[in-house]
Amino acid sequence: MEITNSSTILFRNTMRITDGHLDGFRRAITQAVAFAREHGPQLMVEVFVDEKRMLAHSFQLYRDSDAIRAHWRLSDPYIREVMEHCTVQHFEIFGEPDRDIMASLKTPDGESFPFTVSPRIAGFNRLETPGPGE
């Protein structure tokens, strides 16, 4: 299946965990991911922690820009809790979110952070679940 024109968007968020906040970060991110799993529109969420460098890497895959908006609307309290324990070091966007999403890329307190956007060239995925009898 060719998805060169796919609307899927992958976020990679690199966060610097504040000194002394590792345990708080772990609790907050675990709660946020549990909430997203139960209620969020993401197709995939994975978070990795590099304790030695006090960095965390979050990957989130969305079907489209509408799914990102839904996530932000639903998860704001959880995002705020996570951000009490870290700062965004770098944010990478793979895909092409719409203009509203691009204009809204800020911390919960409205501050800007560095980000890059890499449009898709080609690809495929196997995320679709076959229907009955397929």
Image (tube, grey):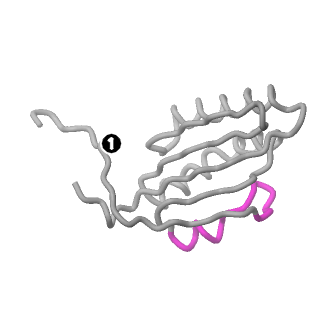
Q: Residue 23: where, in percent of width, then height?
A: 80, 25
Extreme residue toward the left, this view: 133
Q: Residue 33: where, in percent of width, then height?
A: 60, 34
Q: Residue 118: where, in percent of width, then height?
A: 51, 66
Residue name at image x 51 percent, y 32 percent: 38
Q: Residue 44: where, in percent of width, then height?
A: 47, 40
Q: Is residue 101 left or right of residue 122?
A: right
Name the quadrant containing residue 6: bottom left
Q: Is residue 97 above or below residue 10?
A: below
> Residue at label 1?
127
Q: Main secondary structure of the magenta part?
A: loop
Q: Secondary structure at mark 1?
A: loop
Disc 1 crowd, CA 10 A, few/some/many (<14, 14-19, 20+): few
As for residue 120 lying within the magenta part, the answer is no
Front residue of 122/84: it is: 122
Quarter of the image for the C terminus: give it. top left
Q: Is residue 77 left or right of residue 46?
A: right
Q: Which residues are magenta?
A: 98-112
Name the quadrant containing residue 117: bottom right
Q: Is residue 92 above or below residue 39?
A: below
Q: Is residue 93 above or below residue 23?
A: below
Number of labelled discs? 1
Residue name at image x 30 percent, y 53 percent: 124
Identity, as a three-letter code, of the amino acid under mark 1: Leu
